[in-house]
């Protein structure tokens, strides 16, 4: 088990955090997900390759710091809304 800390962008609220946790916990090998909203850091305890985790976060609209764009921001709003409904 390895603990991966990934700094991402676009985490605004609990809805965002809920979407991230829900999606990452579906990945085989992921045991635990914790999120620090203030630093926008996602910490994942997993046997999964870090690149797979980074790709999943990016697909949700939460890319690594410095890799943000308008499309990622738009995706993060959708993920946030879904997270608020669940």
Image (cartoon, helix red, strand yellow):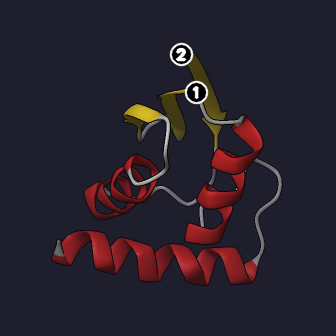
The residue that appears at 54% across and 35% down in the rendered structure is 41
Given residues 8 and 30, the one toward you in this image is: 30
| Residue 81 in the image: above or below residue 27 | below
Q: CA distance from mark 2 to mark 1?
A: 5 Å
Is 17 left or right of 1, judged from the image as shown?
A: left
| Residue 54 in the image: above or below residue 46 | below
Q: Which residue is mark 2?
A: 1
Residues packed near mark 1 inside 10 Å, few (<14), some (14 to 19) or many (20 plus):
some
The residue that appears at 56% across and 60% down in the rendered structure is 10
Residues packed near mark 2 inside 10 Å, few (<14), some (14 to 19) or many (20 plus):
few
Mark 2 and mark 1 lie on one chain; the one further toward the N terminus is 2
Q: Which residue is mark 1?
A: 47
The residue that appears at 40% across and 54% down in the rendered structure is 26
Q: Are marks 2 and 1 in contact (CB under 8 Å)?
A: yes
User: Residue 3 placed where, x, y %?
Assistant: 56, 18
| Residue 7 in the image: above or below residue 79 | above
User: Residue 84 placed where, x, y %?
Assistant: 22, 72
Residue 60: quadrant of the picture = bottom right
**Secondary structure under the numbered disc 2 in the rendered image:** loop
Is 47 left or right of 17, judged from the image as shown?
A: right
Q: Quadrant of the C terminus?
A: bottom left
Looking at the image, the residue that sits furthest to the right is 67
**Secondary structure under the numbered disc 1 in the rendered image:** loop
């Amino acid at each position: 088990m390895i603990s991966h800390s990934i700094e991402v962008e676009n985490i605004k609220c609990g809805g965002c955090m809920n979407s991230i946790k829900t999606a990452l916990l579906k990945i085989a090998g992921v045991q635990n997900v914790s999120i620090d909203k203030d630093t926008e850091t996602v910490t994942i305890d997993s046997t999964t390759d870090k690149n797979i985790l980074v790709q999943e976060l990016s697909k949700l609209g939460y890319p690594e710091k410095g890799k943000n764009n308008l499309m990622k921001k738009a995706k993060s709003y959708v993920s946030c809304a879904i997270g608020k409904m669940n």
